[in-house]
Amino acid sequence: MVGENFHCPRCEKNILLPRQAREPNEKIKLVVTPPPPDIYSTIRLAEIAQSIIANVQRVIVGKPEQVTLAVTTLFAEGHMLLEDVPGVAKTMLSRAIAQSVGCSFKRIQCTPDLQPENVIGDFILDPTTGRKDFRFGPIFSQMVLVDEINRASPRTQAALLEAMGEGMVTMDRTSYRLERPFMVMATQNPIEQEGTFRLPEAQMDRFLIRLSLGYPSAAEEKEMCVRAQQQHPIEALKPVTTADEILKCQRGVREISIGADVCGYLVELTRATREHPALRLGASPRGSLGLFHAAQALAAIQGSASVSIENIKAIAVPVLAHRLLVRKETLKDYPDGAAVIREVVKNTG
């Protein structure tokens, strides 16, 4: 029988002790982190954020703005899309964030033959009980890196929608709550499109922020080589906080106040994208909420107890640009959504 090795006290032989039968509900039970009883002050929020940023910058050289936006995404309980050419440390940034916060981490390498059950899990037959047992997939982790997400088929991409939107996974009429904090960090290469599947608008709208790292300067690239002489810095990176502290930070971010004038500016900004003549699709109400929470997180990281209009302007492009669809006939003047957002920010308020 399949089981654990057991030493028999009577015959002095090693036998296989069968697994104890358990109830099916007991097997699929997940340990979910309860909400913290207290929240952190603005000063404590800024301290934790700066410690995470400093720790990540031991691996990622010369990209303080992108690292800050990645921590902003985490504090705002969102998901991040890293879109850039190969070899600019997209995967390293995701790994450094996960290792710095002390959360469980899993990586999903997307390929055209990747199936949904390889992401969310599948039922297997327990040989000792004859019952079906749910085997959890890599999505059941606090920090999930989905590498080259556009290489997965649309069917597999859709398997991430419920997890990213509701923090749950439904399988065979049973819903499983994902452990918090939960964050999906996806990467994609916008250059090589052969054998890839473009992310639909519904999937893009699930990402709170889209980032591009770009190439480092000559001095920064030299510093990278020096740091990686003995071993890659990611191998020695230690956590500087815990999952429980991140939950308290996320709750603390929601307490950051937004004045009526700032909130009015935010709504005016997103509504202006829906009326822009160069756009076929403007920002959704989810985009407004994402901009709202991302601005709260950015203000908290900067040590401010309230959100300013400057916070909204600073975060508008990475939060809203990927949610827009530019008309083909206007691509000459507006090559991407970022150009539209910059114009809207300039003309609003």
Image (cartoon, helix red, strand yellow):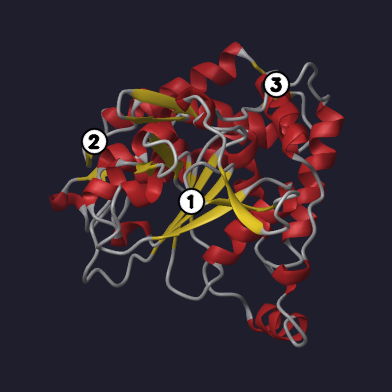
Tag 2: amino acid? Leu
Residue 201 location (% of width, % of height) = 27, 41
Residue 45 location (% of width, % of height) = 79, 33
Element on which disc 1 rests: loop
Residue 278: mark: none
Q: Residues within 10 Å of mark 1 (few under 14, many from 20)?
A: few
Nearest to the observer: residue 70 or residue 130 = 130
Say which residue label 1 marks: 1
Question: In this orientation, does residue 11 appear?
Answer: yes
Say which residue label 2 marks: 281
Element on which disc 3 rests: loop
In terms of image quadrants, where is residue 94?
bottom right
How far apart, in angstroms, are the residues tagged by discs 2 and 3?
30 Å
Q: Is residue 104 above or below residue 307?
A: below
Comes first in the chain, label 2 or label 1: 1
Disc nearest the viewer among 1 and 3? 1
Say which residue label 3 marks: 256
Q: Residues within 10 Å of mark 3 (few under 14, many from 20)?
A: some
Element on which disc 2 rests: strand
Nearest to the observer: residue 297 or residue 33 = 33
Q: Is residue 299 above or below residue 325?
A: above
Tag 3: amino acid? Ile
